[in-house]
Image: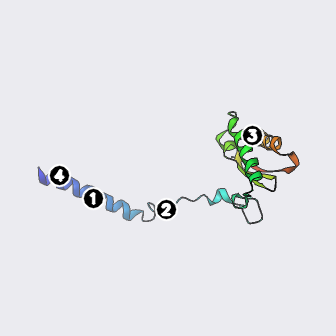
Amino acid sequence: MISKHWKHAASAATLVVCLAAAAPGAMAQAPDNSAHNKNQDNQTQSADTQSNTKSDRDITAKIRKEIMANKDLSTYAHNVKIVTKNGAVTLKGPVKSDDEKAKVAEIAANVVSADKVTNEITIAK
């Protein structure tokens, strides 16, 4: 009986070694979302350029709260990036439709005037 169990254990170990050798980099490959972050250079608004002043943080928080309160919006819309600097708001990220894009921009315009909102939201494919 013992030798039978050793044969199964040895077969399983051989299988694992063979699978690991067949695809050496497959198990260690890191996730890559750089395709989603394209067109993000130092000239555009990003989380790194978010102002830390109380008024800008308050604007961002109000917009985020209103977006999250709207249950008609998708998870994509709930996760739009909101960058506020000197009272000007930039919206970035994908949403599901043109209607969502317009609704998120409308929410932001209700917190600050529409002329202070830059809408860089894209439609997810």
Which mark identifies residue 13?
1
Give the image location of residue 52, x and y in percent: 72, 57
Label 1 vs label 4: CA separation? 12 Å
* Callout in the foreground (2, 3): 3
Circle 2: is it few (<14), some (14-19), or many (20+) Cα within 10 Å? few
Circle 4: is it few (<14), some (14-19), or many (20+) Cα within 10 Å? few
**Residue highlighted by disc 4:** 5
Left or right of residue 73: residue 118: right
Label 3 vs label 1: CA separation? 52 Å
Q: How many marks?
A: 4
Which kind of residue does numbered mark 1 sit on?
Answer: Ala
Label 2 vs label 3: CA separation? 35 Å
* Callout in the foreground (1, 2): 2
Left or right of residue 17: residue 74: right
Depicted 5 relative to depicted 49: above or below: above
Q: Earlier in the sequence, mark 1 or mark 2?
A: 1
Which kind of residue does numbered mark 4 sit on?
Answer: His
Give the image location of residue 17, x and y in percent: 32, 62
Residue drawn where x is 28% and y is 60% of the image: 14
Give the image location of residue 8, x and y in percent: 21, 53
Label 3 vs label 4: CA separation? 60 Å
Q: Earlier in the sequence, mark 3 or mark 1?
A: 1
**Residue highlighted by disc 3:** 100
Residue drawn where x is 67% and y is 42% of the image: 78
**Residue highlighted by disc 2:** 29
Give the image location of residue 76, x and y in percent: 66, 44
